[in-house]
């Protein structure tokens, strides 16, 4: 009797308001009969499920307290965005680990942010890169504008960050669209000398505002400390530019064998993890340096662009670092005004803590791009982080 009285009240309160989805298989027949007889704003789906609309959803829930389950008609998920690039299948397993498809639901393009790639140059007419290249590039090795890549390393690094996505060809970069890849050539081969780096950094500092350079990717390093290089890094950091560097490929503990520039204070250093394509198992790549490293990202068998308009797979912390650089660019583009320090902190606090990485990377930190994009920049007030008291 009480159940029938409640149904009568529901009829009086029903309207085109909030929807409630309920489940009560034992009483489905009663609800359906009363709905038909009394004209209630109630829809019975069958197998015990029904919907009721009301301008007073909280009260309706109380009236339906006899139902086993009753919930608001709320979102329970979203589609994950998957690009149509030809070789995306070779990327999917490691992109899933860092929650990149979920992040692409939020942002896939970079606007008003440039990533400077200090490397061996780039194939400027690569069909999967040219759309995303900043037109004004610089050859710091020869002090001219010829940035063609005769080694291949720079083209591969650039593809990881920003190969055009969802264009039915090749691969997808971490960020898909926007002229945000600024090529600065510092070497013709695999050796980086100090003078071209000096030229490159000075070029960045002169043009930081013009191109809105916010991120610098350094997929190289060495074990001999350079005071000049340290000063260059300090200049970049002081200019509110996030510096991201590869941790190195010698499988050594960088606490005993620091590699520069990754070991300099303020630099976001990146280790490499390997992801099993079948099981999704994650482990530190067998070549990756470890120890006092800021974050880890996939760096084993990373699909990317290579010269002569081709594609290939590359391994190394050189290819883990640009994954993080691409994520940082997406973050800075979405959170306009986020500083380099705020972006560094957002990458740190949003990462996935992996117990299997705790001995190798600070806090076992694995890049999580989806969580990164939903993390607001941490603001400071009076020199302290703003937050709740505990």
Image (cartoon, rainbow, N blue to C red):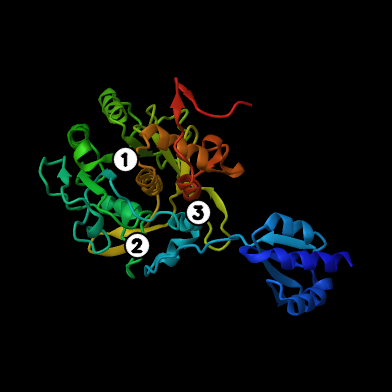
N-term mark: 2 or 3:
3
Q: Which residue is mark 2?
A: 165
Residue at image position (45%, 20%) is: 382
Element marked by disc 2: loop
Q: Quadrant of the N terminus?
A: bottom right
N-term mark: 3 or 1:
3
Q: Quadrant of the C terminus?
A: top right
Q: Considering depth in this image, is 155 or 335 the residue closer to the camera?
A: 335
Discs 2, 3 touching: Cβ within 8 Å? no
**Spatial separation of the CA atoms under disc 2 and disc 3:** 16 Å
**Spatial separation of the CA atoms under disc 1 and disc 2:** 20 Å
Q: Position of residue 8 (x, y in %)?
A: 78, 68
Residue at image position (17%, 33%) is: 206
Q: Quadrant of residue 57?
A: bottom right
In the rendered structure, the answer to whether residue 6 lies left or right of residue 365 reads right
N-term mark: 1 or 2:
2
Q: Which mark is residue 215?
A: 1
The answer to whether any part of residue 187 appears in the image is: no
Q: Position of residue 97 (x, y in %)?
A: 52, 54
Q: Which mark is residue 5?
A: none
Q: Which mark is residue 99?
A: 3
Against 372, residue 268 (above or below) is above
Q: Position of residue 182 (x, y in %)?
A: 23, 47
Discs 1, 2 touching: Cβ within 8 Å? no
Q: How many marks?
A: 3
Residue at image position (34%, 54%) is: 109
């Amino acid at each position: 009797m009480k159940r029938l009285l409640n149904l009568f009240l529901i009829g009086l309160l029903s309207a085109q308001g909030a929807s409630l989805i309920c489940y009560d298989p034992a009483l489905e027949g009663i609800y359906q009969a009363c709905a038909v007889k009394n004209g209630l704003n109630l829809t019975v789906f069958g197998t015990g499920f029904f919907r009721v609309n009301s301008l007073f959803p909280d009260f309706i829930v109380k009236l339906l307290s006899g139902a086993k389950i009753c919930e608001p008609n709320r979102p329970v998920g979203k589609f994950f965005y998957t690009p149509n690039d030809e070789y995306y299948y070779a990327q999917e397993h490691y992109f899933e680990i860092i929650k990149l498809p979920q992040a692409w639901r939020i942002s896939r393009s970079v606007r008003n942010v440039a990533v400077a790639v200090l490397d061996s140059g780039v194939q400027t007419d690569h069909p999967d890169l040219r759309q995303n290249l900043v037109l004004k590039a610089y050859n710091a090795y020869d002090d001219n504008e010829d940035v063609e890549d005769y080694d291949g390393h720079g083209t591969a690094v650039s593809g990881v960050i920003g190969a055009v996505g969802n264009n039915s060809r090749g691969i997808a970069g971490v960020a898909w669209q926007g002229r945000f890849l600024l090529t600065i050539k510092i070497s013709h081969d695999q050796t980086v000398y100090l003078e071209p780096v000096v030229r490159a950094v000075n070029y960045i500092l002169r043009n930081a505002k013009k191109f809105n350079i916010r991120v610098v990717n350094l997929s190289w390093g060495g074990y001999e400390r350079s005071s000049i290089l340290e000063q260059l890094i300090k200049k970049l950091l002081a200019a509110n530019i996030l510096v991201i560097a590869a941790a190195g490929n010698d499988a050594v503990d960088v606490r005993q064998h620091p590699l520069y520039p990754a070991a300099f204070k303020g630099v976001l250093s990146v280790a490499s993890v390997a992801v099993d394509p079948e099981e999704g198992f994650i482990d530190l790549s067998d070549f990756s340096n470890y120890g006092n490293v800021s974050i880890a990202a996939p760096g084993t068998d990373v699909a990317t662009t290579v010269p002569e308009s081709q594609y290939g797979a590359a391994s190394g912390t050189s290819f883990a670092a640009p994954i993080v650089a691409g994520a940082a660019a997406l973050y800075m583009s979405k959170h306009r005004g986020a500083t380099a320090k705020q972006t560094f902190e957002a990458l740190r606090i949003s990462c996935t803590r992996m117990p299997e990485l705790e001995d190798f990377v600070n806090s076992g930190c694995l890049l999580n791009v989806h969580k990164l994009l939903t993390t607001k920049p941490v603001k400071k007030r009076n020199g302290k982080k703003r937050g709740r008291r505990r």
